[in-house]
Image (tube, helix red, strand yellow):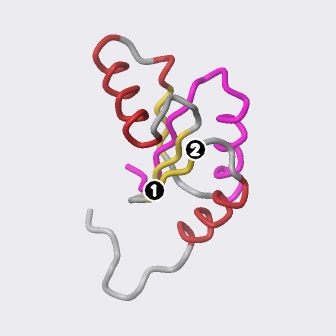
Amino acid sequence: MADITVYALSTCPYCRQARGYLTERDVAFDVVELDKLTGQERADAVERVKKLSGGTSVPVIVHGEQVIVGFDRSALERLAASAQAPRAPGTADQA
């Protein structure tokens, strides 16, 4: 599981831009396509988006405590740079 999650709609052009931007920069992320979920899973995901962003706009990109709403190129640039930054010795992920 990636450290970054993108909440999106499969038909949203800004969501496609955000995913494309992260993909081009080799940033690993998980995608939750809200419109492809059903039932309680969808309701739970939409509620999470509302709590994270204060609304229902997409994309919502989450990395730790950082939340980016919409396609914000400068925020995504900072996110990509921090996601690709080398880890300090002794902080490697545990598998």
Q: Is residue 53 above or below residue 47?
A: below
Q: What's drawn in magenta, residue-wise?
A: 1-25
Q: Position of residue 44 (x, y in %)?
A: 31, 25
Q: Which residue is mark 1?
A: 63
> Which comes before the other along the chain, label 1 or label 2?
1
Residue 92 marker: none
Q: Position of residue 43 (x, y in %)?
A: 34, 19
What is the quadrant of the C terminus in the image? bottom left
Q: Is residue 34 above or below residue 80?
A: above
Within the magenta stretch, is there residue 4?
yes
Instruction: Give the residue type that dot 2 points to.
Output: Val
Residue in the picture at 71% in, 61% down: 74
Mark 1 neighbour class, 10 Å CA radius: few under 14, some 14 to 19, many 20 or more: some
Residue in the picture at 31% in, 21% down: 41
Q: Nearer the viewer, residue 55 or 34?
A: 55
Nearer the camera: disc 1 or disc 2 = 2
Residue in the picture at 42% in, 56% down: 3
* Mark 2, secondary structure of its residue: strand
Q: Position of residue 23 (x, y in %)?
A: 65, 50
Instruction: Give the residue type that dot 1 points to.
Output: His
Q: Which residue is mark 2?
A: 69
